[in-house]
Image (cartoon, helix red, strand yellow):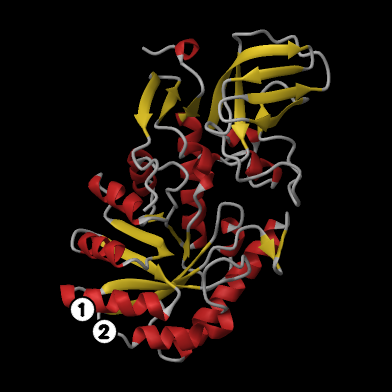
Amino acid sequence: MIEISSLETPCIVIDENIVKHNIATMAEFARQNGVQLRPHIKTHKIPEFALQQVSQGAVGITTAKVSEAEVMADHGISDIFIAYPIVAPSKIKRVIALAKRIRISIGVESMAAAEELSRQATEAGVTLQLRLEVDTGLARTGVAPHQALELAQQIAALPGLDLNGIFTFKGAVYKGSSTLDLEAAGLEEGRIMVETAEILQNAGLRIQHVSVGSSPTAIYAAKVEGVTEIRPGTYIFNDRMLTVMKACQIEECAAKVRVTIVSVPSPDRLVVDGGSKTFATDVQPNQPPLQLKGFGEIIGYPDAILERMNEEHGMIRTNSAHGLRVGQTLDIIPNHICSTVNLHNEVYITNEEEGIRTLAVLARGKLA
């Protein structure tokens, strides 16, 4: 049996009991609210966890990339939505190959992509299932709600395509700005999507799926009548960002990064062996509305701040003498766990009954 004291750092350690709790809690919420659950696997990128989510009631999974979908399909997942515009002809060929094996649907938000999807689908003799992406305020990809009908009608007229849903990702945004009012953000998201779906449906389009919801907003967006599906991802592990949003409790954070102190230059400063190649840096400190202090929550040392990083070094500052020594380990909940997991080839799973085991992050680095 692997002892936790023997783990070489930096590494990610995941509490399996917390994972099971988080999976069951979201699945039960979806059941109680009469919506389907299609979790995004970008957080864990591990087929074993995806299969657990499906076994607990998820109708399928969501991925961002074709390569992630291929990994999951190879390991027993048979219903996948790729929530991303598939544009490159080579990737469309791969989607068509998947469509011949499993139930696959993909996102679309432009005629340029739809026309190429139609051409290849027709040549291959398949019908591709599509969902139109709607921009509900994040200002990323997606068509504006008032332009959705025209584009949807044009796409629906193309051969080889079945446009049967709409989807969005808005996150903690309300009226176009970042917010900590998750209820307002989620309700706005749900209402915009339901109103858009009704416009399309009233025009004769067969819109069956109204898909919404990130981990912070899903429990609110799901309460809007007409929403059919939620796609949270981070909830399986949770992270510091979600604790500050009050979307979860610190005790519900399943994944922590374990690091070793390699240098103690002064009584109020120390250096650990985890830097920017260990921790995600996409959620920066001192930015509104979260105003996070540092790049992670250092467990047991509330006044310690992981304030800066190089590739292999993490510099921690404390407001008082810390008393820590070279060789000691620290556990840190990262600001954003999804991007952090993608930096690691494997994780360590802890279970009180079974001890510690290694699990490969099989979709790690699958970016195409």
Farthest residue to the right: give it.
320
- Camera sees residue 125: no
Number of other residues with Cα within 10 Å of mark 2, as a class: few under 14, some 14 to 19, many 20 or more: some
Report the quarter where the N terminus lies: top left
Query: Mark 2 or mark 1, which is nearer the start of the sequence?
Result: 1
Residue under the image location 51 percent in, 33 percent down: 18
How far apart marks 1 and 2 lie (CA) works out to 7 Å
Report x, y in % for residue 114.
Answer: 36, 77
Asked if the residue at tag 2 contacts the one at tag 1, i.e. Cβ–Cβ closer than 8 Å, the answer is yes
Q: Residue furthest front?
A: 310
> Looking at the image, is 277 positioned above or below residue 236?
above
**Is residue 220 visible in the rendered structure shown here?**
yes
Spot occupied by residue 312 in the image (x, y as percentages of width and height): 56, 26
Label 1 packing within 10 angstroms: few (<14), some (14-19), many (20+): some
Q: In which quarter of the image is residue 250?
A: top right
Seen from the viewer's position, the closer of residues 310 and 314 is 310
Q: Which residue is drawn at 41% across and 90% down?
A: 204
| Residue at mark 2 | 159
> Image height check: is 368 above or below 50?
below
**Is the residue 106 above or below the residue 163 in the image?**
above
Q: Identify residue type, mark 2.
A: Pro
In this image, 296 relative to 135: left or right?
right
The x and y percentages for residue 224 are 58, 69
Determine which residue is flagged by label 1: 122
Asked whether 133 or 355 is in front, the reply is: 133
Q: Report the amino acid beneath label 1.
A: Thr
